[in-house]
Amino acid sequence: MSDLLFDGDGWSYDTIQRIHDAVAEIAIGELGLDVYPNQIEIITAEQMLDAYASTGMPIFYQHWSFGKHFTQHEQMYRKGMMGLAYEIVINSNPCISYVMEGNTATMQTLVIAHAAFGHNHFFKNNETFREFTDPAGILDYLKFAKAFILQCEEKHGEAAVERLLDAAHVLQPQGVHRSGRRRKLDLRAEQDRQRDRRAYESETHNELWRTLPAPTGQRQGADASSPEARRLGLPEENILFFLERHAPKLAPWQREILRIVRLVGHYLYPQRLTKVMNEGTATYVHYRIMQRLHELGRIDDGAFFEFLSSHTNVVAQPGFDSPHYSGFNPYALGFAMMRDIERIVTKPDDEDRAWAPDIAGRGDVMGVLKEVWANYRDDSFIAQYLSPRLMRELKIFSIEDDPQESEYLVGAIHNERGYRRLRRALARRYDPSESDPLMEVSAVDLLGDRRLYIEHKVLEGRLLSKADARKSLQHIADLWGYDVELRELDAQTGARISEYEARPKRPFGREG
């Protein structure tokens, strides 16, 4: 009897089960991966397009923008202008992997190794995901969110709910607690607290808003040192959270929808912080498993060559002068770094011992990799483990573009100082504190006209887009119900660079 898991391209559900069990033997038994239970769903191309449109979540509320994205993706797919992912994987317990029904048996094996074991292990063990997410509660919470928003549409009208979701979606990037407080989610408890919040909010009113605004000219701002500001938690980096808690005119159902959008954004935030590591881990895991299956005679040469062709395409890195270049391919960079760590652990040279003394020559490849996968995110991972040899192999270089100069400047060359500068520069590109605007609610005029003040700390002259700033500020003003002022300040000197103002045009409120 043949040991082959399959023969040819075709597969059945029994084949999928055999593939899963064979992959699990290697992933858990040999590589020592620690994963959530797996749930594998076979879906059509249309269902995959639907998943694209709704952020990849299996259960999600409805919004017009999801339909727009679905139509765009569908038209491009039908015209052959884009392909579809072989799989989508959900950070949940059980871990849900959606795999395309059109995949060959070889590709089903690859994606099960990649998603159901590679991503799954990373989701369960990486500290960033452990801090920000609640895999055991996410599916139930999504069911609650979908049902709640549907009830709101029936009671208050689709137009009112969609307008609120429009505003919340624009502000979702500013709805994450990045500083370390209130990160851990307990989504099951959120549903219980929702019932308590609605009962409380229907009977009470925030004491801070009982007084009428003072006459014009008697404005008093609540800065960070005042008791009122401390009660409001100022300064507050999570603008969506602040509006959800303290906007004076919002109805309880409107606050709950802001909370839903904020918690979903919070849940997805680790994906942004770990794209290189997450894909690098899953790609390394599928590479090791597919190699081992071939060695054991569980897949034949034809299947292995099919795998190698797909894998090579996934980890291809276009050169800087290629028309296809759009930065580093996270699969390519992540996989290359995992393989390089494997080399340093098993066959280090003197340079490796100098640059990575903590792992050079340790010999335990999977032990080292699992430590790395658990304890780093993209910026810290690159800052710690991008080696000089890999920089040379990937031909990494740095160009400085000074607007005051007529020519570009090569910022680092391949010597010791240059390697350190290159590593720092690349790590900074993945640091959210460098790429995300540093914005916070800084003050509220509690006793005057209730104007809300927001500050943007400008780093290295990176101002907000004027159009985006005005659009976002208008949504904030409509949610807040009073005037809002945004000040852009130099992060080093505190000097004011620019400012924007917005007045509520269509304020949200209890009448909504």
Image (cartoon, rainbow, N blue to C red):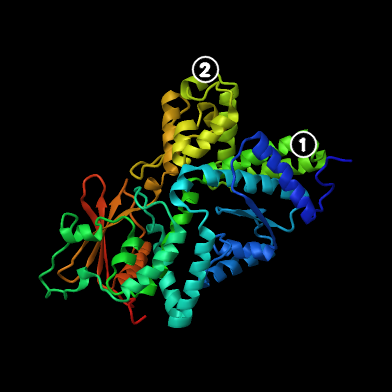
Q: Residue at x 38, y 73 (%)?
A: 254
Query: Which image quadrant for residue 329?
Result: top right
The correct choice, above or below, for 358 with respect to 30 in the image is above
Image coords of residue 339 (percent x, y): 60, 32
Q: As rendered, which of 4 and 30 lies closer to the eye?
A: 30
Q: Quadrant of the C terminus?
A: bottom left
The correct choice, above or below, for 71 with respect to 430 in the image is below
Residue type at tag 1: His
Evaluate whether residue 428 shows in this view.
yes
Q: Is residue 475 left or right of residue 318?
A: left
Image coords of residue 157 (percent x, y): 45, 82
Residue linked to disc 1: 294
On residue 350, the disc is 2
On residue 483, the disc is none
At mark 1, the secondary structure is helix
Question: Dot 2, how many residues are within 10 Å of its Cα: few (below 14), some (14-19), or many (20+)?
Answer: few
Image coords of residue 210 (percent x, y): 19, 74
Evaluate whether residue 264 shows in this view.
no
Separation (CA) of disc 1 from disc 2: 34 Å
Q: Quadrant of the N terminus?
A: top right
Q: Earlier in the sequence, mark 1 or mark 2?
A: 1
Q: As rendered, which of 143 and 302 lies closer to the eye?
A: 143
Q: Residue at x 67, y 36 (%)?
A: 29
Q: Residue at x 24, y 61 (%)?
A: 232
Image coords of residue 495 (percent x, y): 20, 51
Residue type at tag 2: Asp
Question: Dot 1, how many residues are within 10 Å of its Cα: few (below 14), some (14-19), or many (20+)?
Answer: some
Q: Residue furthest left?
A: 218
At mark 2, the secondary structure is helix
> Quick check: marks 1 and 2 in contact, CB under 8 Å?
no
